[in-house]
Image (spheres, helix red, strand yellow):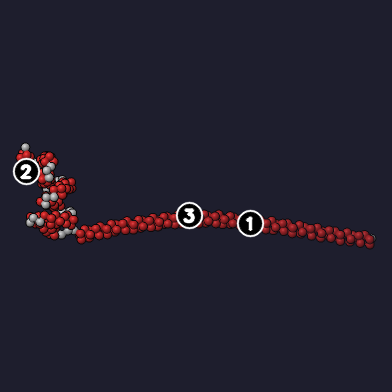
Amino acid sequence: MKLSATLLLGLCLAAGAARAGMFDDEEARKAVAVLGVQVEANQKAAEQRLARIETLVQDRSIDLARQIDELKQELARMRGQLEVQAHQIETLDRRQKDLYVDLDARLRKLEASAQAQEKQAASAPDPVAEVKAYEAALNQFKLGNYQASVAAFQSFLAAYPNSQQVSSAQYWIGNAYYALRDYKMAIAAQQKLLASWPDSAKAPDALLNIASSQAEMGETRAARETLQALLKKYPGTPAADQAKQRLAGKR
């Protein structure tokens, strides 16, 4: 009986222990389940945080790439502006140089023109002195100072080569040589007049003087041909009238 009681007590104790073990396992399972939920929650939270971080990094990368692209575009615009400005500066510099060269050339021309005018004004003959020189040479001829007249007219031609009286001065040189009976020099002087000033009013008289010199030298045929040339080239002039009379007297 006592053994049974002991066995019963042991069985009771064993049953209690079994119940206690079963209780501990349930609690453990609950704890594990809770821990699993917590771990899952933490993992999910971590994944969400990682996703946010990746999104943020991606967004920042996109923004950074956009900013870099904008900076590149801005740099390209600045380079373009600098190139345009450099071209404008180069063009302006070239224009300034061209303008300087043009102005310098114009100034040189103006200076040269001014100097030429000054020289021309300085070398311009005195009209009063010109008239006096011509009259002085002609007066020597009228006085019969033929050699002095030749020298005076030659000086006049050298001093006043652009005078309106140059052909007349040349005629009187030839006429003075004729008066000096230097017929060859007379002919040469009058031929110079005809060659240099064929339209001069003294040209007919120069031909008549040549014919006279030829006649004095005994060149009758040459004198006649000269008179005929005078009639043909300068008809209606006083010299031509004299040529007619001479040709009529020789027939």
Cα gap from disc 3 to disc 1, whole angstroms: 38 Å
Q: Which residue is mark 2?
A: 242
Quadrant (top left, top right, bottom left, bottom right) of the N terminus:
bottom right
Image coordinates of residue 90 in percent, x first then y, are: 40, 56
Residue picked out by circle 3: 76
Q: Are marks 1 and 2 in contact (CB under 8 Å)?
A: no
Q: Which residue is mark 1?
A: 50
Q: Residue at x 11, y 41 (%)?
A: 220
Please give left or right for residue 89 compared with residue 134 in the image. right
Where's residue 92, x and y in %? 37, 57
Q: Is residue 134 visible?
A: no
- The amino acid on which the numbered mark 1 sits, given as a three-letter code, is Leu
Find numbered disc 1 in the image and state the secondary structure of the residue it sits on. Answer: helix
Reading the chain from its start, which is encountered first: label 3 or label 2? 3
Number of numbered discs visible in the structure rendering:
3
**Three-letter amino acid code at disc 3?**
Ala
Q: Residues within 10 Å of mark 2 (few under 14, many from 20)?
A: some
Q: Report the mark closest to the observer, 1 or 2.
A: 2
Instruction: Compute the Cα span from label 3 to label 2.
Output: 100 Å
User: At 83% from the left edge and 58% from the top edge, which residue is drawn?
Assistant: 18
Location of residue 5 by image quarter: bottom right
Position in image of residue 240 (x %, y %): 8, 42
Secondary element at image label 3: helix
Work out whether residue 160 or residue 144 is closer to the camera in this orientation and state it.
144
In terms of depth relative to the viewer, which is nearer, 179 or 156? 179
State the SS at label 2.
Answer: helix
Q: Earlier in the sequence, mark 1 or mark 2?
A: 1
The answer to whether mark 3 and mark 1 are in CB contact below 8 A is: no
Q: Label 1 vs label 2: CA separation?
A: 138 Å
